[in-house]
Structures are given as C-alpha cells and as structure tokens.
Image (spheres, rainbow, N blue to C red):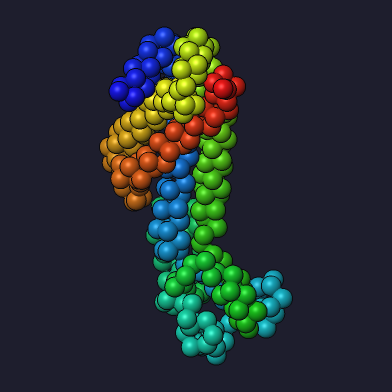
Amino acid sequence: MRLRFILGEVVNGLRRNGTMALSVVLVTFVSLMFVGAAALTQMQIDQLKDDWYGKVEISIFLCPENSTNEQCAEGAATPEQEAAIRAVLEEGALSDLVDTVYYESREEAYDKFVANDSEGIWSSLTPDQMQPSFRVKLADPEQFEVVADATEGLPGVDVVRDQREIFSELFRFLNAATVVAAALAGVMLIAAMLLITTTIRLSALSRRRETQIMRMVGSSRSLIQMPFMLEGAVAATGGALLAVGGLYFGVTYLVEDWLKGSVTWVRYIGTADVWTVAPWLLVVAVGLAAVASVVTLGRYTRA
C-alpha cells in the first residue's frame, strides 16, 4: 500500500511538473554527455600512450666529424667508444631497463632517410654526412630519463633523443580537450542540480497542503519526502540513460564505423568502454538528485 502510494505520488508529480521534469532530463543528458565524453577521451589517451610509448625508441646519436658539441671535440666516435656505449646498455646497470639495442650505421641511416624523401629534396646528402646511432627500445618507456642521464655524458655520445617528443604536443592537445570537456561538464552538472532543486521545490510547493495533512496524521518524514526524491531521481536517471545512448551511438558510428575505417593504425576505444563509463554516469545522476533533494526538502517538509 505504501509503495503504491509513493509510486502514485511520483507519477502525479512528474505529470504536474512535466515541463520542468523534461528540462531536468535534457540538462542532465547534456551535462552527462560531457562527463562521458571527457572520460572516454581520457581512456583513449591512455590507450594511445600504452600503444605508442611502448613502440617508440630512444635514439643515442654518436659524435660525427666536425661536430660543434664540446663533448665531441675529439672527433667522431671511435669503435672502442661505440663498444663501451653498447656495454653500458646491454651489460651495465641499465641492462634491466633496456629491451633491445640496435646499431644503425651511417649507410643504414642514409638509406632510411632517402626512402622517406620522396620529393628528392635532400638528394645531395651522402652517407658520410649522416650520424650513426644506437636505437634503444626500453622495457619501461617511462624510464627514459634514467637511461638518458646515464648515456648523455659517455664519450662518443653527441645527443640523446626520445621519440615520445613527437607525440607530446598531440597528447597535450588531447589532455587540454579533456580538461575543457570536464570543465563544461562541471558547469552543466551545477545547472542540472539547480534545475532539479527547482523542480523538487515547485513540486513540494504545489503539494504543500497534502504534506501538511500527512504530517498531521503522523506520517514519517521519510514517507513524505520519498516521492519528491524519486521524482528528481527518475528525471536525472532518464537524462543519464539518454547520455549513455548518445555515447553508445557516437562511439559506434563515429569511432568504430568511421574512424576505424579511415585511420587503421590506431587502436580505438569501443562500445565496451561506454558500458564501463555508463554505471558511473548513473551514479552521478542519482547523486545529483540526492543532493538536490536533501538541500530542498529539509525546508519544505519540515515537521
């Protein structure tokens, strides 16, 4: 009987304040779309880092002839210096951090450079003008600084470069996009909570006489407040479900159908990640409704 009464009051309240309830649904939908988009973007960034940082290498360029680097004042790196550098990487204290070491000669560097110079702009270069180098793949790419500090000062080393620098600007841009989406989501969540609060307040005011009668006959505060709380929760949950649906279709059609077919060398997030985010969106929606209810109902249903 009590459950039927509560559900009936919820339905009546939503019907009386249908426009406000629809506004709550839409604002919650938009705000949680931003929250979900920010979460999925960060998941994609983390996935890209795992994929790309695991593939990039450290390049230890050896001293060429006529280098302006003070460390190369004695001239080009000698075979003995090259052997000493390899020993540090493969047998020294860095061996646990290093996965593989590949020596790239001047000739190999030249062949690779020419292969990438399709327009022949650098056709005047010769192998003697290239730098030999060690290409080092790390067991843990995050340990770049350790390896760089240990090798930069070795005799015969000109400069140490990390290929992660290629992706740093891209990841900075993507992280900035995540922050912007999260900031917009925060603003929209505040707007959603204020709108839920207004909806609950209007519903409580429209039924003030009923709540007074319920208090007079001894109804508990929880029984009086429950219909109003459920109204906000139902509207917010509706917005969360729409947001989950929007993210699902967005990932399905934009990412899985379009991006995966256009750019095939990137491993993208999928609909499974949407289902990972979905419960958290529902929790946020119900949390908003709960906070708005506590803030509002204490005043309008006070005994």
Image position, residue 83 (x, y; %) = 51, 88
**In the rendered image, the vertical position of residue 79 relative to residue 32, given as above or below:** below
Given residues 61 and 229, the one toward you in this image is: 229
Given residues 223 and 72, the one toward you in this image is: 223
Say whether residue 112 is left or right of residue 291: left
**In the rendered image, the vertical position of residue 63 relative to residue 3, given as above or below:** below
**In the rendered image, the vertical position of residue 279 relative to residue 300, given as above or below:** below
Residue plotted at (51% across, 53% down): 167
Image position, residue 243 (x, y; %) = 39, 30
Which quadrant: the N terminus? top left
Residue plotted at (48% across, 83% down): 95
Judged from this view, the residue extending furthest toward the bottom is 80
Image position, residue 56 (x, y; %) = 45, 63
Residue plotted at (44% across, 33% down): 286
Say whether residue 118 is left or right of residue 71: left
Which quadrant: the C terminus? top right
Instruction: Give the quadrant of residue 229.
Output: top left
The answer to whether any part of residue 188 appears in the image is no
Residue plotted at (50% across, 16% down): 216
Given residues 208 and 153, the one toward you in this image is: 208
